[in-house]
Amino acid sequence: MRKGEIKFNKKTNTLEEEYYRYELQDIDEPNLFREIYNYSDVPKVVFNHRIVPMNPPDDVWITDTTFRDGQQSLPPFTAKQIVDLYTMMHKLGGSDGLIRQCEFFLYTEKDKEAVRKCMSLGYKFPQITGWIRPVKEDFKLVKEMGLKETGILTSASDYHIFLKLKKTRKQAMDMYLGVVKAALDLGIVPRCHLEDITRADFYGFVVPFVQELMELSKESGIPIKIRACDTLGYGVTYPGTALPRSVKGIIYGLVNLAEVPPEQLEWHGHNDFYHGLINATTSWLYGCCAANGALLGIGERTGNTPVEALVMEYLALRGVKDGIDTTVITDIAEYFEKEIGYEIPNNQPFVGRGFNTTSAGIHADGLMKDEEIYNVFNTEKILKKRVAVAINDKSGVAGIAKWLNLNLNLDKEKEVGKDNPGVLKIKEWVDSEYAKGRTTSISKQEMIRKAKKFLPDLFGDDSEE
């Protein structure tokens, strides 16, 4: 590696050493980081205690992979379903484009039909982009569809270079650079997907490769983009974590060593170790403009970072709405369940039916006094989801009273309390059900029947069990 000069950094207002030019290390045997990734053990988290500064870009945004990576985990979407979801994504992200881009497969006639129909809507955001293999022939598909940008698979780890592609690092780099040059020749913005970056030799392959890409970007005047892909969810955010697992280190290195402009940098993570969301938001905080995800977090294995969660994190970190319509999150969830047949886990944040539902009597008692005590925010305003109560053996009289007030839409003057005789009767019936061995929650239909029996005044003259 060659050392650079000392230059004044206008952003930090300090003299800084220009970083080394890293050379490709074309080794004979793959570096599989066996001290960290011993396949027979849980992967290790190693520390070197190097702390990198938090450096959020001026602007951050979300990119979507629902119709590419996300779709790989489900039966294929129909063209209509893709168009409907794309339209809702446009509404969710707002006119300023919080959801900036959306990537599509281009291989089948159905894929192409979906792209054409989405393009015909004329939305500026999300911009429609493609995804192709690292072969020049695939650019015909991109050009035919009239797309301005495409993702290109450029696997970064020796697991992929040596074991999957059966190439050396130099052969892989030469192949990738050839495909990127083909994109540039056609005037297409290439987005290089550095697959498996959290098992890649950062200084021996990633930085030299990306430095070459940035040189091509300067020469061509076309902004080559870099997607850092945490393909197996190995990334961690702990302070002082060593590469290749450090999310902060990867982003810092790509921006400062490989000189990737933040607006050309994107994080793509998976949730194998429950780190999907925190890794994505950390990438924002440490210098990456774009965080990639999929609606509801769908995707192969444990899924991608949920787009709706990224929207919430953006609002929490930036505090600005920019036309974002969070109520569309509930529309999207209902569409997945009703039109696609996807079963959302009840306890999934923001979109699960149990997200703002309590079955604990003490929590229901708090909700009766003030909804803010046990609800994360005004879910009715932000997500069109009223706070809810589920009835089981833990609900108590408070839970039953709150359920009745909510589900019967009772006005304040008609609301029932914990000491209401009818509520106490329903509580006795609920207790008897579980004393007989019941294990399921009480259904809405059952509760309505018992309310009509024990609280007939709430229903008028037509009440009956």
Image (cartoon, rainbow, N blue to C red):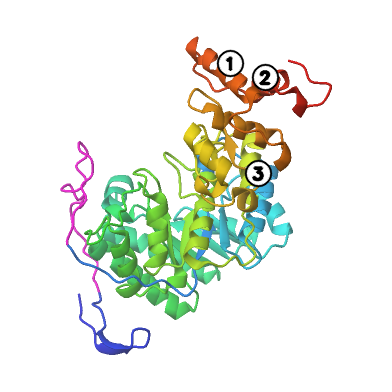
Return the mark for residue 450.
2
Q: Can you identify the residue that label 1 sits on? A: 429
At a point 62% along the width and 33% down the height, the residue shown is: 417
Dot 2: element = helix
58 lies left or right of 251: right
Quarter of the image that includes the N terminus: bottom left
- Closer to the chain start, of discs 1 and 3, is 3
Q: Is residue 251 above or below residue 40?
A: below
Q: Can you identify the residue that label 3 sits on? A: 110
- Could you classify mark 1 by the number of other residues whose Cα lies within 10 Å: few (under 14), some (14-19), or many (20 or more)? few
Amino acid under label 2? Lys
What separation in Å lies between label 3 and label 2 (alpha carbons)? 51 Å
> Which portion, as a residue range, is magenta?
22-48
The x, y position of residue 214, in whole percent, is 39, 74
Q: Do the residues labelled 3 and 2 touch (CB within 8 Å)?
A: no
Quarter of the image that includes the C terminus: top right
Res 411 visible: no
Q: Do the residues labelled 2 and 1 touch (CB within 8 Å)?
A: yes
Dot 1: element = helix
Asked which quadrant contains residue 421, the reply is top right
What separation in Å lies between label 2 and label 1 (alpha carbons)? 9 Å
Amino acid under label 1? Trp
Magenta stretch encompasses residue 27: yes
What separation in Å lies between label 1 and label 3 (alpha carbons)? 54 Å
At a point 46% along the width and 53% down the height, the residue shown is: 133
- Closer to the chain start, of discs 2 and 1, is 1
